[in-house]
Amino acid sequence: MRAALVVIALFLMAPPAMAVDVQKVVSKSGLEAWLVEDHANPIISLHFAFRGGAALDPDGKEGVADMTASTLDEGAGDMDSQAFQGRLDGSAITLSFKAGHDAITGRVETLTATRDQAFELLHLALTAPRFDQEPVSRIRDQILAALRVSMEDPSKIAGRKLMAVLFPGHPYGRPVEGTPESISAVTIEDIRAFAKGRLARDNLVIGAVGDITPDELSRIIESTFGGLPAKAAPWEIPQTRPASDGRTVVIAKPVPQSAVSFAQQGLKRNDADFYAAFIINHVLGGGGFGSRLFSEVRDKRGLAYSIHSYLYPLDAAALVSGSAGTANAAVAETLRLVREEWRKMAEQGISEKELADTKTYLTGSFPLRFSSSQHIASILVSMQLDSLGIDYLNKRNSYIEAVTLEDANRVARSLLKPETLTMVVVGEPKGLTDNK
Amino acid sequence: MRAALVVIALFLMAPPAMAVDVQKVVSKSGLEAWLVEDHANPIISLHFAFRGGAALDPDGKEGVADMTASTLDEGAGDMDSQAFQGRLDGSAITLSFKAGHDAITGRVETLTATRDQAFELLHLALTAPRFDQEPVSRIRDQILAALRVSMEDPSKIAGRKLMAVLFPGHPYGRPVEGTPESISAVTIEDIRAFAKGRLARDNLVIGAVGDITPDELSRIIESTFGGLPAKAAPWEIPQTRPASDGRTVVIAKPVPQSAVSFAQQGLKRNDADFYAAFIINHVLGGGGFGSRLFSEVRDKRGLAYSIHSYLYPLDAAALVSGSAGTANAAVAETLRLVREEWRKMAEQGISEKELADTKTYLTGSFPLRFSSSQHIASILVSMQLDSLGIDYLNKRNSYIEAVTLEDANRVARSLLKPETLTMVVVGEPKGLTDNK
């Protein structure tokens, strides 16, 4: 190989100025949607979210938000599940709902030609869902089957246990998909009550991308969502901090490779230091092969098969979290190195060069998120859920550019506390036991 | 619900005239690529395929094509796996390879700004792959772990067994991913030899979509692929017909729900009757909720959780295949109904209305395949592998429109032979045993 080829500079060219035009569309009754018009193909993606998700599941009924999301499209109006799904299918319309901790999200993908049918079906699902016995039983069985599989998956066990340890007695400590017991306890009345309380106009955000004009979208959001109640049931998730006190929890499972999940207190999406933390985390463990964790743990020592970290801001709490997959014999040393890199970052911060490289990467790779209309529609919804402002897409890179080395290292110092890292290990880690 | 809403006509509007401009680009030395220019985002997708895939695995070394594809991007030139993956990762470049029965396919997704780096890395992977001991061992372990999981999955067991029963002694009867034994037998020399024999210019097709001009693409395909050998190692896969003789094979596995796979002789992609068969299959079991199999087996009787059929043309054989998931108690009745619908279709064909509805659906939903640049790039490669012609995208709907009721029913009669359907059941089906 010619030597010159090895010197592959990243993003040598300035990222092209990308002006994404997001329009605010307001309907007759005041419903709002954000729109990116794109008439290149006769396709429309409409994504939306109702604030308030699985964290609002009643105690003992964990999983009801998830079951509600999974059964909303299983029959509506005078159409049973078969008839309703048949309509979607016959017109090649995608309609689906999903529950997260903080919101119920939904999406419609349709051809322009079947636009009105698609939104009428969505309208029915939202305003006249049936929750018939047959689909509810069937979906419950499917969720139970998926739960059985995930309860054998070391990394999923570790992730669930980590949240339970970090948030005892708080809704975030409970799994979105529930447990076999709680899922079995959920009744059709629970589902009906959950949908009734959550699907409303005041907790709704909407993003649309594709072959539709602002006028058409205005009319459609009115006819689709205008019939919902004005207000969702009152809700509040207590703000909380994770109980991260440096504990290591070991769950014994006979597998050759241990799954590790770890976390400490993080910062919220609207924190003024979010972008500094974003950069710090990229250098620490977010930047894939280039990150310090990857370099120290996998590249130099070959201890782990995978290792990474990420910021995980929720509405009522925030984490810096991470995970690793490692041979049982290497778990203890891997955990030691994670804490060590955490400490080094807190004490010494990052270098001018790391800052510059990370900025170049994060700003340069941003356009990759715009490779399909579904991705863009989903971003438009997140922007609204996170109150990022309608001009966010065009300003986002400037927020990253604005982070100084001083900002970054100040945030590293104040944020990262290796002695607080809570770790969950699932496997047969050698020489490692619960430490508290 | 207002009654008028129930009358949801499908695709009432004529599908918009969609002229996708595919350009033929030829490099200095005569390499050819098909290109859809799209400068809306600074992103380029380049997909490609080398004809000749896992069907060429040497006996006892099944899985070598798959392992070759999985290790091609694990180090090249003077970069080991870490360094090579680090370059990709640091520039947010996606590069991956995959093996199928008939081809090794690959794809690059890159920002315009990192285009030259991306294609230089692809060039190195193709012309100077390293196949070092570490990544080969690691990938082998990953494939073995995935195999262990899939060997517990009833539908995957059924699918693999069906191919083994249909194609005994023929390469198509062997799994692309190999077996634990064959994977363990594959050496680095086997991988090296496979890559050397397969990666050449005369069996290569290329499709590109995105922010690149024909001149730039011409230069890039020359520098990327021009250094490959002119000719692949000679290869031939014997043309064959599936041994489908009406056999039912039962594999006992203690699960509440049986997985069923079935197939009979099909027709090749270049068969003059392909579009008629495509329509027939859509009505029979390809059209999701609207299909006859779905309607009879699931909708009216609730026997199966899922059921569908599809055309499966390969280079050297062809199937009409299908699958179902059904409670153990309902398997026998489900299989009976599949044969019954098969027979009805062969004897009575489809109606004028079914023909018209299917044409409207298949032509109207076609634009949904164009929702991302990756999808389009992948279609451009398939078009070339299947010799469909550069104007296929704009002609495809006319091929479907041209099918007459007489064509459709003639093909139903000649193609569908319920007595030949071979079926594999994995589970604990009640009252069902091997019938041969």
Image: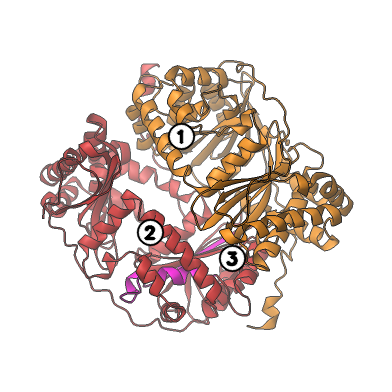
Chain colours: A red, B orange
Disc on res. A392 = 2
**Whole-number angstrom distance, CA of label 2 to CA of label 1:** 30 Å
Mark 3 or mark 1, whichever is nearer to me: 1
Residue picked out by circle 3: A213
**On the picture, is A123 further left or further right than A383?**
right
Residue span colored magenta: A44-73
Q: Are marks 2 and 1 on the same chain?
A: no
Task: Look at 52% across and 51% down and name the residue there.
Answer: A372
Classify residue B379 by image quadrant: top right
**On the picture, is B421 further left or further right than B231?**
right
| Residue reaching furthest to the right | B406
Residue picked out by circle 1: B95
Task: Look at 58% across and 58% down and name the residue there.
Answer: B326
Query: Where in the figure is residue B28, as x and y percent of width and height?
Result: 61, 20
Mark 2 or mark 1, whichever is nearer to me: 1
Which SS class for mark 2? helix
Classify residue B344 by image quadrant: bottom right
Q: Quadrant of the N terminus of chain A?
A: top left
Q: Chain of mark 1?
A: B
| Type of amino acid at the residue the image marks with label 2 | Tyr
